Image (cartoon, helix red, strand yellow):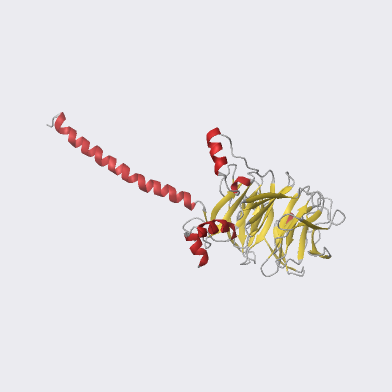
Amino acid sequence: MLTKQENFPGVTAVLLALALVLVGGCAPVQERAAAEKESSLIYPPPPDEPRYAYERTIYGSADVTPRNKDAALKRALTGELETSEGLVKPYAVTVHRGRIFVSDSADRFVKVFDVPEGRYFKIGDDERGPLTKPLGLDVDAAGNLFVADGTAKVIMVYDRNGKYLRRIGGPKVFERLSSVTVDAAGGRVFVTDIGGVSSDQHKIHVFDSNNGTHLFDLGKRGIGPGEFNLPRDVAIGSNGQIYVVDGGNFRVQVFDRNGKFMTSFGSVGKQLGNFARPKEIATDSAGNVYVVDAAFGNFQIFTGDGDLLMFIGERSERDGPARYMLPSGIYVDEDGRVYMVDQWFKKIDVFRPAGLPTEAGFLNKRAVAAEAATGGKAGAASRQ
């Protein structure tokens, strides 16, 4: 029979061994948690091949402007909160060389977040080119900004820095503006007139972007091929095809560059590839088509022929990466990054293509330049 003293070392050894097992088990658990968190920001998630990674969210000016060290020290000493001009009711987004333009229909401005320059400013607050309800946006190759003003019923055109240039259309031409799209060459402007319950003006107006001359219209109210019921937005494919979100008919219609109907895809439903409340649309350089659905809380990605590839996002009452309550605008920039607007959470989520390095592209030119000046890796990479 063992005495109390004789038994104690054995108990200690058992406890020590158990502790080692528990401690040793912590590392894999922590690693798994980190891996799960990281994989939750990859789309689609493992084991599928990754296509996109969540990169950042922009809520306001503080997310792009450089932080002043003196101001940061003052906030640390006094407890003063950092000031940031945020979004009130963002609607649409467009991007040119890292400069992000977001229409804010409640604040009546286009808010500009220039990531490479670390700069924030607003467009539409001057006497020559005031905005009253900016909705749809687009930019041409030079960075000129086209804004659909829903209240003024006009397309306002500004240069890249917000200088007013000209206007297209007016109340005699448009009934209920929704969006504006410029083709890649910058020669044509497509304006979506959403119409209404008592209106037959459910159509796409096409203008010469330089002089505002009306060229032709697409569609009329109806449910047949080439007809629209509450059209929402237009995107131009890499091959010049015209993609129109036909919201009330729960489909995307496709036309050739001259406006001839080609085909359509989508139908009402709750399954992947269906639409419930489609809103804005975008295309990338590979010809893929991105469609926001406010009811699903996501954007679906299709081939140019309408075959579903994948989706990103989920409807949620809690904010977070790829979580949306009222998504509206979408844009794909020159580098393939996808920008998604949510009106409820007042934000823009940015997703990077899996094949694009973190430091690559216009959105990170400032970081690359800074590291190049100090001989960093990013500078070396940018010279290769």
Foreground of the two, 258 or 372: 372
Instruction: Return the residue found at the far left.
Output: 1
Instruction: Return the residue found at the far top.
Output: 4
Query: At which x and y percent is residue 199?
Result: 84, 53
Query: At which x and y percent is residue 192?
Result: 77, 57
Q: Is residue 158 visible?
A: yes
Q: How many numbered dots are placed on residues in this image?
A: 0
Query: At which x and y percent is residue 311?
Result: 58, 56
Foreground of the two, 284 or 68: 68
Residue, x 62% and y 40% (percent of image)? 83
Instruction: Return the residue found at the far right.
Output: 172
In the displayed structure, 239 sits above or below 171; it is below
Foreground of the two, 244 or 320: 320
Viewport quadrant of the N terminus: top left
Query: At which x and y percent is residue 255?
Result: 73, 67
Residue, x 21% and y 35% (percent of image)? 11
